[in-house]
Amino acid sequence: MTTPATTALRKTALNATHRRLGAKMVDFGGWDMPVEYTGIIAEHRAVRTAAGLFDVSHMGEIVVHGPGALELVQKVTCNNVQALANGQAHYSGLMTEQGTFVDDLLVHKMSDTHYYLCVNASNQDKDFAHIVQHNSTGAQVENAGDYYTQLALQGPKAAAILQRCTKVPLAEIKYYRFAHGLVNEVECLIARSGYTGEDGFELYFAPEHSEKMWFALLAGGEPDGLIPCGLGARNTLRLEAAMCLYGHEIDDTTTVWEANLGWICKMDKGEFLGRAALAKQKEEGVKRILVGFEMTDKLIARDGYPVLHNGEKVGHVTSGSPAPFLGKNIGMAYVPPALSAVGTQIQIGIRNHQAAARIVPLPFYKRAK
Amino acid sequence: MYPTNCRYTKEHEWIKMDGATGTVGITEYAQHELGDVVFVELPKIGAKISTGQPFGTVESVKAVSEIYAPVSGEVIETNAALGDAPEKINQDPHGAAWLIKIKLSNPSEVNSLMDAAAYQAYIAEKQKETSA
């Protein structure tokens, strides 16, 4: 076990709060973040059965506004921004000219001339530079990560808990929609979205209210079993829900077709960065594809472990972990299309073992509607 | 908190001597750093292990951690109960969740390991680094 120097790490507005509450802190992509409070298993189960509160202020925000905003966001991302209504968000990819991912992101449409992008923490500066580089429309682009605290309140009890803290009628905010309003007397962007596979909300607001909001939400949710959670549970939750994580399932070498993300790529929306490369790959077919697998023996697959078939390396694990709610050891991996059918037996190279696994449908976990 | 009848390594293993045999486990500090332990892989009885070399693996939900031999010797017993209940490592790392028993090649080797006071000072220093 090594202990990284913490002096150069970036901190969210809640850093001192997390430390005071005894959270276990880790270096997460250059940020000093809570990995767990009471334990990943307990936090994971709380989100599946009640609710959990996450500080995800390390996530980046980029604001694009002005008359050229729509055209610019349409150009650099693969989903169809034209299809968004005001107050609606969608999942998308920030594209290279090769049709690979600079990042994945949420695009929130505030108005025809104002878009609010939520991007990965460690990619924020790269994303900003990329968008600016391709800005031929005269839109204004602002790297706004420092202006917001982002909290995620997730779980089947999230709506009931949040409703006690706001007069905004939450039932009117459908999935992937958002509204503005007061939560615990703080002006927030209230988005019904998340990275856990559960119902829930992501709140964006000014950092000076962070500690007040953190404790008010926890107090409001305590009767329903709300607990503070760290990024460890966030990762196991998103893996059970088969959501991609940048640097694992997707990066600047992978495409939407390979990552099973064809649903976020609208080839008929007009020209966008990477479209030609994506059209070519779609026609030629992919050489690898993302699949889900579960271990059929006791060993645990981890990120980077080789996937084997008849003793030959055929791919690699992108994310692997115990799945605390499902009670299985699961993972996602890239394999050749010929080996991607559900039920295919594969092996994972784990230390000196060739551990048995089989390909299963994704997602591993889907909440009841 | 750390038993004074044990010796400790910088990699957070403990060893408790009984004549020429020693019982080995991981420390409270190690289990806390790991978080929820979900899997343990131990060597076979009769395996030879040598000082500083990994002899097994403890996995938590988020991490894989190798366990290093505090001394050289032969494995004479392993804690089979951990196979079905690895979480015992979180609950009782210095007691019921011992990992292996070894017959030492050279019992005096333990004298070069830290005693409880030295280990406690060692981890206090580590904790100071992480809370900086």
Image (cartoon, grey):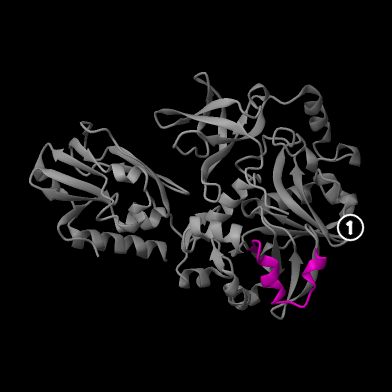
> Which of the two residues, A115 or B87, is positioned nearer the viewer here?
B87
The residue labelled by disc 1 is A85
Instruction: Tell me the element at label 1.
Output: loop
> Which of the two residues, A32 or A286, is positioned nearer the viewer here?
A286
Residue range in magenta is A153-173
**Residue occupying the point 47% across, 49% down:** B61
Q: Position of residue A268 (x, y in %)?
A: 90, 38
The amino acid sitting under disc 1 is: Ala
Q: Position of residue A279 (x, y in %)?
A: 83, 30
The correct choice, above or below, for A182 with respect to A30 in the image is below
**Residue occupying the point 59% across, 60% down:** A49
**Residue occupying the point 67% across, 48% down:** A366
Q: Position of residue A8 (x, y in %)?
A: 50, 59
The correct choice, above or below, for A157 with respect to A2 in the image is below
Left or right? Give the position of A147 relative to B7: right
Asked which quadrant contains residue A260, the reply is top right
Image quadrant where one finds the C terminus of chain B = bottom left
User: Most extreme residue toward the bottom, as rendered?
Assistant: A185
Asked which quadrant contains residue A340, the reply is top right
Left or right? Give the position of A355 relative to A271: left
Label 1 marks a residue whose chain is: A
Could one spot residue A91 in this view of the protein? yes
The correct choice, above or below, for A305 with respect to B127 in the image is above
Image quadrant where one finds the N terminus of chain B = bottom left
> Which of the two residues, A165 or A64, is positioned nearer the viewer here?
A165
The answer to whether residue A163 is magenta is yes
